[in-house]
């Protein structure tokens, strides 16, 4: 499987990756039952190739900004709870009087909308039988929280 280097801005393929990328170009571009190409794998390969060349900044100009935001609001690390409900780690900002602080909390969503958060900050915790990388996986989920917009109590809607 090819490794993709899709950044904010487009780029040219490097000499050492050129042969593998060219070999992966779908043989024929045709429309089958209203879709380009025969397989989802070919469609994703072509999309990845194009995104490497034009970059994410150009791609987000092609659609509705609200749709793009909704797509990235559900990260890979979001854990399903039950139908329409998920959770992940997010940075929360709090203010009491003159004091302000931030901490990583578990945040729960209903249909992508934040509805609740843990009363106390998240702790780094995993089961001993989860494997040697479990701690790193937990840290990775928390690290993703640091790259997302900070939430405040005002961002939460009550569950219905």
Image: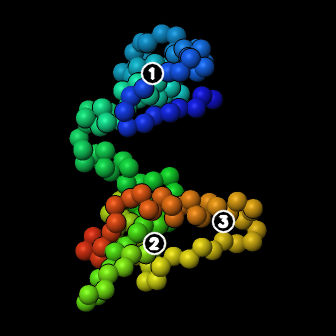
The residue that mark 3 highlights is 135
Q: Residue at x 53, y 32 (%)?
A: 4
Disc 1: CA contacts within 10 A as few (<14), some (14-19) or many (>=20): few
Q: Which mark is residue 157?
A: none
Q: Residue at x 62, y 60 (%)?
A: 137
70 is higher (above) or lower (below) than 142: above
In front of the other: 8 or 85: 8
Q: Residue 66 location in percent, x, y?
A: 25, 48
Q: Residue at x 44, y 62 (%)?
A: 146
Q: Element under label 2?
A: strand
Compare marks 3 and 2 and give the one earlier in the sequence. 2
Tell me where residue 23 sits by quadrant.
top right
Please tell me which of labels 2 and 1 falls first in the chain.
1
Q: Which residue is mark 1?
A: 12
Circles 3, 1 touching at the beta carbon (< 8 Å): no
Distance between mark 3 and mark 2 Cα atoms:
16 Å
Quadrant location of the C terminus in the rendered image:
bottom left
Q: Nearer the viewer, residue 86 or 160?
A: 86
Can you say which quadrant of the picture contains the N terminus? top right
| Percent position of residue 24, x then y | 56, 18
Image color mode: rainbow
Find out whether the residues at labels 2 and 1 contact each other: C-beta distance under 8 Å: no
**Is residue 159 visible to us here?**
no
């Amino acid at each position: 499987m090819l490794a993709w280097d899709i950044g904010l801005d487009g780029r040219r393929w490097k000499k050492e990756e050129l042969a593998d990328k060219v070999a992966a170009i779908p043989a024929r571009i045709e429309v089958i039952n209203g879709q380009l190409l025969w397989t989802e794998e070919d469609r994703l390969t072509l999309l990845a190739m194009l995104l490497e060349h034009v970059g994410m900044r150009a791609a987000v100009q092609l659609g509705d900004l609200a749709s793009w935001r909704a797509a990235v609001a559900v990260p890979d690390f979001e854990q399903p709870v039950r139908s329409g409900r998920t959770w992940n780690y997010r940075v929360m900002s709090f203010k009491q009087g003159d004091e302000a602080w931030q901490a990583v909390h578990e945040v729960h969503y209903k249909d992508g909308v934040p509805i609740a958060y843990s009363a106390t900050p998240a702790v780094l915790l995993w089961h001993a039988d989860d494997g040697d990388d479990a701690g790193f996986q937990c840290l990775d989920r928390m690290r993703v929280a640091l790259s997302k917009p900070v939430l405040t109590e005002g961002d939460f809607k009550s569950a219905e």
